[in-house]
């Protein structure tokens, strides 16, 4: 048993966007004396092992289990089948946890920390008799909207009609947490389906029912960005709900870039040397995350827009970004831009965003990317693709004042953004008074994030409170087994 007396099992949804924050949370808990078992699917563990660098090794163990899908299954490319597999994972997870604890070396499980879309852990936690802690990998506002999906359904906000986003009478004000009014286009993109019987639509609704049944809630945000009254709205049953993010930042500041260890793609660190040769705050970094796809028509417009902007750029161009196929770039583009542009297949994003040469970020606005950009003081040009990214993008622009966006991408997923608007967006992000204001706000948020995770900061203190509460609950549970009526639940 660790110093704290706790053994936490951490269960992510097997995707880049959820593995990264949870592996960082695991390291933070491990460094505080919590024994950690990190559950991976066999296939994701193989990808992570292949991509990992030796200096990224965490201080906890992994438990690898099968997901029930064929080896050649596309996983995230066939998301509907993957989410059903995850819903049915409970018995397999329970079996492997019980098997691993029977070796006499692994201490008993005292809590399960689960990503918010892993309802299979609900019954597992019940059978093991331990608290189930939901860790929201979204911002608190998106989390509240998702957790209350059935409330939104009853008010007629779901299914989403994105064309209503321009109508003032369609703003959403029924959610708890003292949120700014939300637009229909801010809600999870799964709810835009016209066929409400679709797999992803129904899956997201089912998950929301279990998301309100946690014994404890942690959120990858910080109080200075989203206040405690917002975060506490994620406690639907009276249990504690605390902001503990950005969870990557303490590890990064201590020299541990665990995003590399949690990566499913191999990072190309040669781009850091290229950045060394660029002027301060001159480079626009372009990355759309691990899942988003773009048509070759759109990639051509983006390439020409970057070229016409005249700014140096570092562009992450995944092998499968063009609908599972390599991108086709305009003839002569790479030759014309070779002196001020670099294209890589995958990059060490936090190291890139922290580099002094980077001055702006064209992003899909996944929550990890938003937090990383804010924490490094880098303004964002938002180009959302799916899920919660539409809300993140709008809040970066309208609420947190660290970004701008492209016209129409929030309501038309098939819209092709023309090169002229891309060029204009890059120049707005990198040049003139507006860019200066964005950079100033970025530095303010960077300071707030650093303060939150530093000793005595809000997230630092909240994480310590969580460990204390789990320790007390674990002790209470031990006594309760002997004296069943003596100890109340923490919630």
Image (cartoon, grey):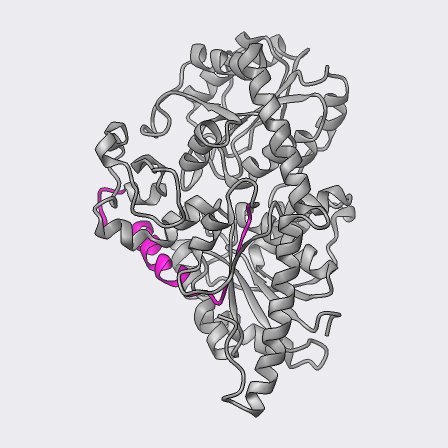
Residue pushed farthest bottom? 482
Q: Is residue 288 left or right of residue 203?
A: right
Answer yes or no: is residue 463 visible.
Answer: yes
Q: Is-magenta flag for residue 383?
A: no
For residue 3, what is the image quadrant?
A: bottom right
Q: Nearer the viewer, residue 40 or 215?
A: 215
Range covered by the magenta-colored residues:
193-221
Percent position of residue 184, x then y: 30, 37
Give me the residue at 54% from left, 17% from top: 429
Q: Quadrant of residue 236?
A: bottom left
Q: Residue at x 54, y 35 (%)?
A: 370
Residue 345 showing in the rendered view: no
- The foreground one among 440 and 406 is 440
Residue 326: % across, % down: 51, 29
**79 lies above or below 357:** below
For residue 51, what is the image quadrant? top right
Q: Which residue occupies the foreground of this view, 70 or 423?
A: 423
Residue at coordinates 25% horizontally, 30% vertically from top-left?
168
Q: Assign the N terminus to one quadrant of the image.
A: bottom right
Q: Does 205 sit above or below residue 159?
A: below
- Residue 71: percent from left, percent from top: 51, 56
Residue at 63%, 39% (x, y): give it: 449
**Membership of 211 in magenta stretch:** yes
Q: Position of residue 412 (x, y in %)?
A: 32, 28
Residue 94 in the image: above or below residue 389 = below
- Tell whether 349 sits left or right of 480: right
């Amino acid at each position: 048993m660790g110093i704290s007396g706790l053994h936490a099992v951490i269960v992510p949804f097997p995707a880049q966007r959820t593995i990264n924050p949870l592996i960082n949370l695991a390291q933070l808990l491990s460094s505080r004396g919590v024994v950690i078992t990190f559950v991976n699917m066999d296939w994701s563990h193989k990808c992570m092992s292949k991509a990992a660098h030796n200096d990224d090794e965490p201080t906890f163990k992994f438990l690898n289990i099968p997901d029930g899908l064929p080896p050649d299954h596309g996983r995230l490319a066939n998301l509907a089948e993957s989410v059903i597999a995850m819903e049915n994972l409970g018995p397999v997870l329970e079996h492997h946890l019980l098997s691993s604890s029977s070796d006499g070396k692994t201490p008993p499980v005292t809590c399960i920390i689960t990503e918010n879309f892993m309802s299979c852990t609900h019954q597992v936690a019940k059978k093991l008799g331990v608290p189930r802690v939901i860790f929201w990998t979204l911002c608190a506002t998106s989390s509240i909207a998702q957790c209350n999906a059935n409330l939104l359904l009853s008010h007629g906000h779901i299914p989403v009609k994105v064309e209503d986003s321009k109508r003032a009478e369609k703003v959403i004000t029924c959610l708890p947490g003292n949120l700014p009014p939300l637009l229909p286009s801010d809600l999870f993109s799964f709810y835009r389906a016209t066929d409400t019987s679709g797999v992803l639509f129904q899956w997201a609704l089912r998950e929301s029912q279990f998301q309100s049944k946690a014994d404890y809630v942690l959120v990858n945000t910080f109080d200075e960005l989203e206040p405690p009254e917002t975060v506490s709205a994620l406690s639907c049953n009276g249990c504690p709900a605390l902001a503990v993010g950005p969870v990557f930042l303490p590890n990064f500041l201590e020299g541990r870039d665990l995003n590399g260890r949690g990566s499913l793609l191999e990072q190309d660190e040669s781009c850091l040397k290229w950045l060394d040769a660029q002027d301060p705050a001159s480079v626009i970094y372009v990355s759309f995350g691990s899942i988003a796809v773009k048509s070759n028509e759109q990639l051509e417009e983006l390439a020409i827009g970057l070229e016409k902007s005249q700014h140096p750029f570092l562009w992450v161009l995944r092998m499968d970004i063009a609908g599972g196929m390599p991108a086709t770039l305009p003839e002569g583009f790479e030759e014309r831009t070779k002196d001020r542009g670099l294209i890589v297949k995958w990059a060490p994003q936090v190291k890139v965003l922290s580099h002094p040469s980077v001055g702006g970020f064209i992003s899909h606005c996944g929550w990890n990317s938003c937090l990383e950009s804010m924490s490094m003081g880098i303004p964002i040009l938002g180009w959302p693709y799916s899920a919660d990214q539409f809300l993140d993008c709008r809040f970066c622009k309208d609420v947190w004042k660290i970004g701008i966006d492209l016209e129409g991408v929030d309501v038309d997923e098939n819209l092709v953004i023309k090169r002229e608007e891309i060029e204009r967006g890059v120049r707005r992000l990198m040049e003139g008074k507006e860019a200066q204001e964005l950079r100033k706000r970025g530095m303010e948020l960077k300071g707030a994030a650093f303060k939150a995770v530093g000793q005595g900061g809000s997230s630092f203190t909240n994480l310590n409170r969580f460990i204390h509460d789990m320790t007390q609950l674990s002790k209470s549970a031990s006594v309760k087994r002997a004296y069943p009526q003596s100890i109340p639940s923490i919630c």
